[in-house]
Amino acid sequence: MFPGFHGTDLAARAGYPLITVPAGYAADGIITPGGYTTKGPHGVTFSGTAFSEPVLLRNAYGFEQAARRRIPPCLS
């Protein structure tokens, strides 16, 4: 598990499955490890070993349901 903006390259190149779920929203911006400020939605990425998609989906779903960090878009 790692921030949605960091670390996905290595896992993807190795062929490992990844899934990103909502982890919050930064209205004021946060400083990332690279030193730049980001505003808006943030996610957390889960990575698994090859062919571990069922476990990965179960863990990501559990996190999303427990954290309740998703902000639905305003459609009006």
Image (cartoon, rainbow, N blue to C red):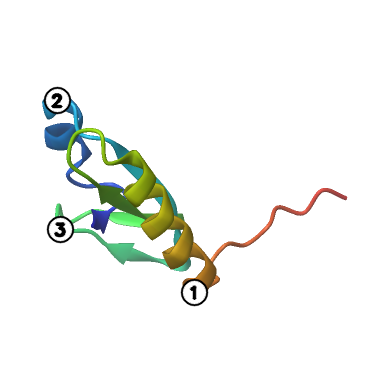
Report helix, strand or loop for mark 1. helix
Q: Which residue is drawn at the image coordinates 14% and 25% (left, top)? A: 13
Amino acid type shown at disc 2: Arg
Q: Which residue is drawn at the image coordinates 45% and 65% (left, top)? A: 62
Q: Is residue 16 left or right of residue 20?
A: left
Q: Which residue is drawn at the image coordinates 31% and 51% (left, top)? A: 45
Mark seen at residue 33? 3
Q: Residues within 10 Å of mark 2 (few under 14, many from 20)?
A: few
Q: Position of residue 55 (x, y in %)?
A: 33, 50
Q: Is residue 50 above or below residue 1?
A: above
Q: Residues within 10 Å of mark 1 (few under 14, many from 20)?
A: few
Q: Earlier in the sequence, mark 2 or mark 1?
A: 2
Q: Position of residue 35 (x, y in %)?
A: 17, 56
Q: Which residue is drawn at the image coordinates 22% and 59% (left, top)? A: 32
Residue 54 visible to the viewer? yes
Q: Earlier in the sequence, mark 3 or mark 2?
A: 2
The Cα–Cα distance between marks 2 and 1, rounded to whole angstroms, is 30 Å
Q: Which residue is mark 2?
A: 13
Q: Nearer the viewer, mark 3 or mark 2?
A: 2
Number of marks in the rendered image: 3
Q: Position of residue 9 (x, y in %)?
A: 17, 33
The Cα–Cα distance between marks 3 and 2, rounded to whole angstroms, is 22 Å
Q: Nearer the viewer, residue 5 or 39?
A: 5
Amino acid type shown at disc 3: Pro
Amino acid type shown at disc 1: Ala
Q: Nearer the viewer, mark 1 or mark 3?
A: 1
Report helix, strand or loop for mark 2. helix
Q: Nearer the viewer, residue 47 or 2?
A: 47
Q: Is residue 31 left or right of residue 68?
A: left
Q: Which residue is mark 1?
A: 66
Report helix, strand or loop for mark 3. loop
Q: Residues within 10 Å of mark 3 (few under 14, many from 20)?
A: few
